[in-house]
Image (spheres, helix red, strand yellow):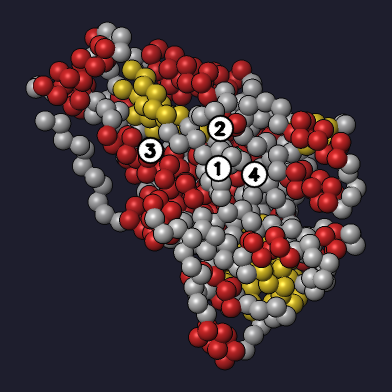
Amino acid sequence: MKRRIEISELRSQRWFDSPGIRSFNVRTRALQMGYSREDFEHKPVIGILNTWSDFAQCHSHFPQRVEEVKRGVWQAGGLPMELPCMSLSETMVKPTSMLYRNMLAMEVEELIWSHPVDGVVLMGGCDKTTPGLVMGAASAGVPAIYLPAGPMLSGRYKGRLLGSGSDNWKYWDEYRAGRLSQREWHDMEAALARSPGHCMTMGTASTMTSVVEALGLTLPGAASIPAADSAHARLASDCGRRIVDLVWQGTKLEDIVTRASFLNAVTVLMALGGSTNAVIHLIAMAGRLRVPLALEDFDAISRRTPVLANLRPSGKYLMEDFYYAGGLRALMRELAPMLDLSCSTVSGRPLGETLEDAEIIDRDVIRPLSDPIQAEGGIAVLKGSLAPRGAVIKQSAASPELLRHKGRAVVFTDRDDLARRVDDPELEVEPDSVLVLQNAGAVGAPGMPEWGALPIPKKLLARGVRDMVRISDSRMSGTSFGTCVLHVAPEAARGGPLGLVRDGDLIELDVPARRLELLVEPAELERRRAEWVPPKPFFTRGYGQIFMQHVLSADQGCDFDFLLAGEPTPEPKIY
Ligand code: FES
């Protein structure tokens, strides 16, 4: 353990306790807010970065949780200061919250950098808030602890469990196929989201909070606690107390997280059958900490890690069941032979020690290594002539019979084209066709929205078809299922082969061999390439233009190039 730092080493003291007029002004303004000298003198200042807003439905309990974090900070002898930041509701923010993940990360870094903050509690949960907060705090280089929002309670309708996203998509297809009445559809709307908290399937939110726990950045067990449980309120106060200790110990985020922690996180991702979005976010988070992490690491770990979590969309249950079954700690204890248990955690104890008393309560929800849901991890990385720099597929949520498939392409040049034609009765498509969506990536869409689970054409739905091979440079909601090849790199709008596919081309998908091939003669592809013109940029001004000019590709985590370069910025000068 690091030595306890001196008061004079606290970053905030340079604001509050420097000689001269600037500190006089800072103290004056703290007194103006009603704080007394005892409140701020010689105390670590803890920034509580809160992604709450009236639009952040998954974080609607955060105003109460902030008070609980503050209680913990006060108890431990710190000064808690709330810093609101971008809320990024997955549902409300259009065209896609992914457009703004990097903006949140920049905001977090700059808020920490420019304020008298010694350590931070990061409050997030709804999809992009988790990576955005962690990326920003990693670049800011201060002690940090992550407080996940916790999953909402399970949805229920007429005795059936309803899971966020997964069941929306499932019953939407039933509704489109005419097998569900309007009345039932509306009743389901009201039965799906029953409490505060993030999506309660193993979608992107649950995946990201779980992998951040596996990285060691939450208190043990934090990611599985339902938002509405009183244990979640206690967790918030624990975070407040613990961050003060981390500040006094001088333990920064980068002291906790290493390449071994990232490999642990990837192992957990695979065993959870977690969201493909985590591949992009983990690479981006690792980039901020200058830890090497590549698509190849994901595939190597996937091949040796079984899926143990029986959670939708890969399995049967929901996060509330997972919590009662023992939660992430129980799953990680089962996975222990595959994890580096010496990795640090914000609890101050090595990972292995935090798992010692974990126990699987329900072995159907969390399977033992001897009886997994699937022998291999949830995500496979593909390469080949259609994806020279890689693509991913969530094989645990795909149809097994489609994992080896050859079919003719039915191409949609963008999302508008897809919306216009996919349900056209004249569309030439068969159940064994391969649906291809172009220009849906980081630059092409832009923002890489979750369009990758292309809808099944209505005329095939009517014939009972529920899954087809679908390929795009887009992402897919972590709650979705189906045989969807995603994140094809390079993306179509940057000149990738995906943009050269034409109707009728033969495409071969071979997941066991990790191949994705466009079976078109090279000379023909060269001819098409010579004719190819990049799509007109959607944004010609503002943040959107910055995004399009600087976003890296999916295999590089979609961070901005200028945020990965350069030296750490020195502290602001206070004269
Ligand atoms: Fe917030 Fe799904 S909408 S996590």
x 61%, y 17%: residue: 230
Q: Amino acid at mark 2?
A: Phe
Instruction: Give the x, y percent position of residue 438.
Output: 60, 68
Q: Earlier in the sequence, mark 1 or mark 4?
A: 1
Instruction: Give the x, y percent position of residue 156.
Output: 80, 31
Instruction: Give the x, y percent position of residue 18.
Output: 13, 23
x 79%, y 62%: residue: 423
Q: Amino acid at mark 4?
A: Gly
Quote the CA–CA distance across marks 2 and 4: 20 Å
Depth order, front residue of 311/36: 36
Label 3: few (<14), some (14–19) or many (≥20) C-alpha neighbours in 10 Å: many
Q: Which residue is mark 3?
A: 108
Quote the CA–CA distance across marks 3 and 1: 18 Å
Check the image and name the residue furthest to the bottom: 523
Closer to us: mark 3 or mark 4? 3
Q: Earlier in the sequence, mark 3 or mark 2?
A: 2
Q: Is residue 303 visible?
A: no
